[in-house]
Amino acid sequence: VCSGCGNMSCGSFYKCKDCEIYLDLGCALMENIFRGWDAKEMLHYSHRHFLKRCRPGQDAQGSCLLCEFPISPSSICYGCVYCYSFLHEHCLQLPTEFQHPVHWDHPLRRLDYTQLLGSRKDCNACDDKIIGIPFSCLECEFDIHFRCADSLLRGLVHKSHEHKLFYVPSDAHYFNWKKYP
């Protein structure tokens, strides 16, 4: 992670031998650069390694471990320098537990990475594989993407219909509302 601009890069860089200062080639060539990036580091339940505050940079790909929305090169994230995994900084404020109308029996909780080792879960709302960290009920084996849980809560009120309408992506299977009270 560049100490000047905060970009995470896989390319060449300059490093101080005595301390944790790194400059990418662009910042190293600037005369007026100073250590302006606040490179906080944290351990988060969603990932096994420390995550550093950064901007993913030009090589950004993939999606946030929490919301599963794409990572843009300029977004402020917490990233893993070993795995190249990211969390949007604003996603750190997402709840880790909530009650959802499609699963009233128990609260849905965010799993941590140790509960997912060696297994991938399918979303009970859209049947797609969950790439990031799902909201789950371990008692009922109910798992849901954050984006599906959010979409099912919001709904669209349209004057042509008396009930809320819910967004279903074109590549998703139809959610069986009757299956989950």
Image (tube, rainbow, N blue to C red):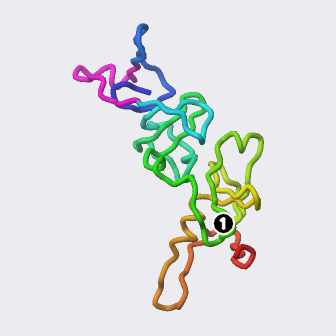
Horizontal relation, residue 89 to residue 136: left or right:
left
Residue drawn 47% across and 29% down?
9
Quarter in which the C terminus is drawn: bottom right
Question: Residue 27, percent across and down?
Answer: 33, 24
The quarter holding residue 174 reads bottom right
Residue 11, relative to residue 14: is it above or below?
A: below
Residue labelled with disc 1 = 171
**Seen in the image, is 104 located left or right of residue 9?**
right
Task: Give the residue type that dot 1 points to.
Answer: Asp
Crowding near the residue tagged with mark 1, few <14, some 14–19, many ≥20 C-alpha atoms within 10 Å: few
Q: Does residue 25 lie above or below 103 as drawn?
A: above
Is 83 in front, or is 113? 113
Q: How many marks?
A: 1
Q: Is residue 53 left or right of residue 161?
A: left
State which region is magenta.
22-39
Farthest top residue?
18
Check the image and name the residue furthest to the left: 32
Quarter of the image that includes the N terminus: top left
Residue 68 % position (x, y): 57, 52
Identify the residue at image location x=30%, y=20%: 29
Residue at point 41%, 32% (across, down): 7
Kind of element beneath mark 1 = loop
Q: Position of residue 168 (x, y in %)?
A: 60, 71
Q: Relative to 77, does residue 38 appear above or below in the rendering?
A: above
Asked if residue 6 is among those painted magenta in the image, a careful observer would answer no
Give 165 or 105, whichever is nearer the viewer: 105
Q: Tell me residue 132's x, y (percent).
A: 62, 48
